[in-house]
Amino acid sequence: MNYMYERMEAAGETAIFDRAELKQFEQYVADNYNEFYKNNVSYESKKEGNKFIITLFNNPVITMEEILLDIRG
């Protein structure tokens, strides 16, 4: 993993998921679609090997940490 991704992960806006966790994340986004859309929440996904790097872009509504708490509960 390169320095940029390490910094984003440390800032709490990037998470690394396996395929099962990615499905949970996608379901979370679907369940909260209206809130994401209303507040222009966006994210980027990148596949590296068997892992998926998800970066949540800066927004006033939710952090990756909050999402992780909800999906990993």
Image: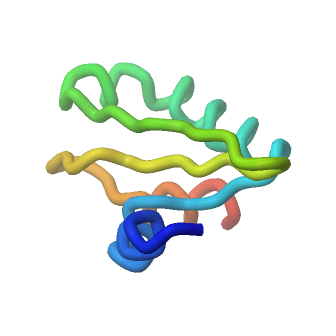
Residue at x 15%, y 49% (from the top left corner): 60
Query: Would residue 19 be found to the left or right of residue 67 on screen?
Result: right
Position of the N terminus, as image quadrant, is: bottom right
Above or below, 48 relative to 72? above
Image coordinates of residue 30 in percent, x first then y, are: 55, 24
Image-quadrant location for residue 38: top left
Residue at the limit of the structure toward the left, as seen here = 60
Residue at x 69%, y 63% (from the top left corner): 72
Above or below, 71 relative to 9? above
Residue at x 62%, y 42% (from the top left corner): 25
Report the coloring of the rendering. rainbow
Between residue 22 and residue 5, name the one nearer to us: 5
Image-quadrant location for residue 39: top left
Q: Tally the numbered discs.
A: 0
Image coordinates of residue 29 in percent, x first then y, are: 51, 32
Between residue 23 and residue 73, name the one nearer to us: 23
Image coordinates of residue 4 in percent, x first then y, are: 38, 66
Residue at the limit of the structure toward the bottom, as seen here = 10
Above or below, 4 relative to 44? below
Image coordinates of residue 69 in percent, x first then y, are: 56, 66
Position of the C terminus, as image quadrant, is: bottom right
Between residue 7 and residue 23, name the one nearer to us: 7
Query: Would residue 64 be found to the left or right of residue 42 on screen?
Result: right
